[in-house]
Image: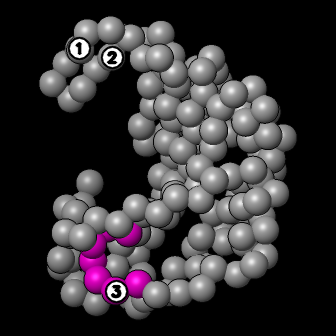
Amino acid sequence: MNDNASSRRFDVELFVVHPTLSSAEITRALTLLPSHSSSVGEKRRNPKGELPGVYRDTRWRYSQRFVVEDQWFHEHVAEFVDALVPHRTFLEQVRSSGGSTTLILQFLGDGYYGDNISRATLEAVNVLGLDFGIEVYADPQSPP
């Protein structure tokens, strides 16, 4: 658990997978620095070093961490989605050219969350062509 037992951490993320675009191209188009990325054709790696083979597609993930003192998270999700609206055309191009785009809400095991995401936010997610994913870590995750 956190040092402050009442605070809860969660991440809102944009995850892009594409068969031909590079991580650098996605970064330039979205003007966001990824938290993790690998590009198609690059040698595979893990934290300990190089692995056999190359990546078969590009995987690009931008993550924004939020800390709240209660169970509510919807405002942060709405803000994140609103910030993506100027990139709608690029996100549509990613999907129409064989890629995928997913908005991920990632709870880090810090306690109870319960909230409603408004129809307006869900409609914006739909208009942006994003899939919606939820990841829940049952055990608390250590800070980065």
Circle 3 residues within 10 Å: few <14, some 14–19, many ≥20? few
- Residue 63: assigned label: none
Q: Are marks 1 and 2 in contact (CB under 8 Å)?
A: yes
Label 1 vs 2, first from the N-terminus: 2
Please name the amino acid that badge 1 sits on: Glu
Check the image and report above or below for 114 versus 20: below
Residue 111 forms part of the magenta stretch: yes
Which region of the structure is painted magenta? 107-113
Location of mark 1 (residue):
50
Residue beneath disc 3: 112
Q: Looking at this view, is 19 or 82 the one in front?
A: 19
* Residue type at the position of mark 3: Tyr
Q: Amino acid at mark 2?
A: Arg
- Marks 1 and 3, how far apart at CA: 39 Å
Q: Residue at x 38, y 11 (%)?
A: 54
Quadrant where the N terminus lies?
A: bottom left
